[in-house]
Image (cartoon, helix red, strand yellow):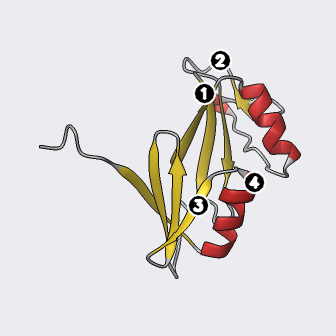
Amino acid sequence: MFKDAKTFSSYSVDDVSRAKAFYADTLGLETSDQMGGLGLRLGGGEAFLYPKDDHQPATFTVLNFRVDDIDAAVDELTGKGVAFEQYGGEIATDERGIARDSGGPAIAWFKDPAGNILSVLQV
């Protein structure tokens, strides 16, 4: 029943206008105003960001961007003012915010203006 269903992700933000500026201008995504929220057109599908008055940022990664070169992606985003998260422990990040030797792909996490966690990962 669902194996061929088109899917999309959705999560809340506290300010749709700020989200639109970040996702369109900083990340370069195609956006559209939809039902009081923000539609994102992604290479592999879509996402919908909806306003929520009592928004609480997700404590997990809500959106992952696969990239061919994580160093170039981190450099580009850093140049646009994006700050990467720093983590220690099992998935420790380097000084640039990239976790390279965690048993999975190289990955770096950052937050949108609403505090939701996004990532770039090299596959």
| Label 2 sits on residue | 101
Q: Position of residue 1 (x, y in %)?
A: 11, 43
Secondary structure beneath dot 3 equals: strand
Q: Quadrant of residue 101?
A: top right
The crowding category of the residue bearing disc 3, from other C-alpha atoms within 10 Å (few below 14, some 14 to 19, many at least 20), is: many
Pick out the residue farthest to the bottom.
53
Residue 9 vs residue 108: left or right?
A: left
Residue 30 visible within the image: yes
Kindly indicate whether the residue at mark 4 contacts the one at mark 2 (C-beta within 8 angstroms). Answer: no
Query: Which comes before the other along the chain, label 3 or label 2?
Result: 3
Find the distance from the CA under tag 3 to the CA under tag 2.
34 Å
> What residue is drawn where x is 67% and y is 53%?
111
Mark toward the start of the polypeptide (3 vs 4): 4
Which residue bears the numbered disc 4? 26
Amino acid carrying label 1: it is Glu
Kindly identify the amino acid type of the residue bearing the numbered disc 2. Asp
Nearer the camera: disc 1 or disc 4: 4
Task: Give the residue type that dot 3 points to.
Answer: Thr
| SS at badge 1 | helix
Q: Which circle marks residue 90 in the picture?
A: 1
According to the picture, the residue beneath numbered tag 3 turns out to be 31
